[in-house]
Image (tube, grey):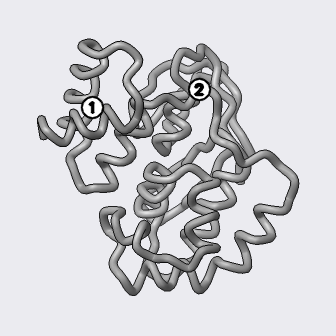
Amino acid sequence: MFEYLKGQLAEITPTYAVIDIGGLGYLVQLSAHTYAALQGQKEAHLYLHQILREDTNTLFGFHTKQERELFRLLISVSGVGANTARMILSAYDPNELIAIIQSGNDAPLRQVKGIGAKTAQRVIVDLREKVATLATTGEAIAPSEAYTAQAEALAALLALGFPRPASEKVLRSIATQESNPTVEQLIKLALKQL
């Protein structure tokens, strides 16, 4: 089991990064928040979760230990796989997700693609007490300073079920036309174009 990877950022996309360590490239799956935190960086330090299956060996990388712990809690819930957990963590930052689970309101979770009413309710019931202890561990759960409005808008569009390539293209177009748009402006303008 790997704890973390630290190396040169050889390649990065919104869903994965390739970390070069001593000439060996590690393909690591990312959430939107981790992707945003890595923007403009030459080196990456990612906390890992490894999933071994008969036919695959997949690494999921996270900018903070808290995000990784939330991922692990999410995949412990029946009906939530690794990709669904990554979608949830792309839609909500760790603070938001903890607040959603503690509130008991499953509506925000149901907005994430692949999450139905039963699964959303199961996430809340199974994790309410567990995230309370995570929230009090003392480690900062605040979103990264590198987290951008564009990445947050992308996460929101993905949560609404829009395809990633089209959403990214529209957001890039808006970002070139508007100067320092807010998340709300980006989402409103993107919804008009999608």
Q: Position of residue 15 (x, y in %)?
A: 40, 40
- Which quadrant of the view contains residue 132? bottom right
- The quadrant of the image that shows the C terminus is top left
Q: Residue at x 21, y 49 (%)?
A: 162
Q: Quadrant of the N terminus?
A: bottom right
Q: Secondary structure at mark 1?
A: helix
Q: Position of residue 3 (x, y in %)?
A: 75, 47
Q: Nearer the viewer, residue 122 or 78?
A: 122
> Above or below — where is 59 with respect to 105?
above
For residue 194, above or below residue 117:
above
In the picture of the structure, the residue carrying the numbered disc 2 is 146
Q: Is residue 96 left or right of residue 110?
A: right
Where 118 sits versus 191, above or below?
below
Pointer 1: what residue?
Answer: 168
Which label sits on residue 15?
none
Distance CA(mark 1)–CA(mark 2)? 18 Å
Q: Quadrant of residue 109?
A: bottom left
Identify the residue at horizontal 29%, vertical 16% (top origin): 178
Point out residue 63 in the picture as x, y percentages from the top left corner: 64, 39
Nearer to me, 174 or 2: 174
Vertical comparison of 106 with 58: above or below: below
Q: Earlier in the sequence, mark 1 or mark 2?
A: 2
Kind of residue at badge 2? Ala
Q: Is residue 141 left or right of residue 26?
A: right
In this view of the protein, which residue sits in the foreground, 110 or 183? 183
Secondary structure under tag 2 reads: loop
| Kind of residue at badge 1 | Glu
Residue displayed at 54% across by 61% down? 52
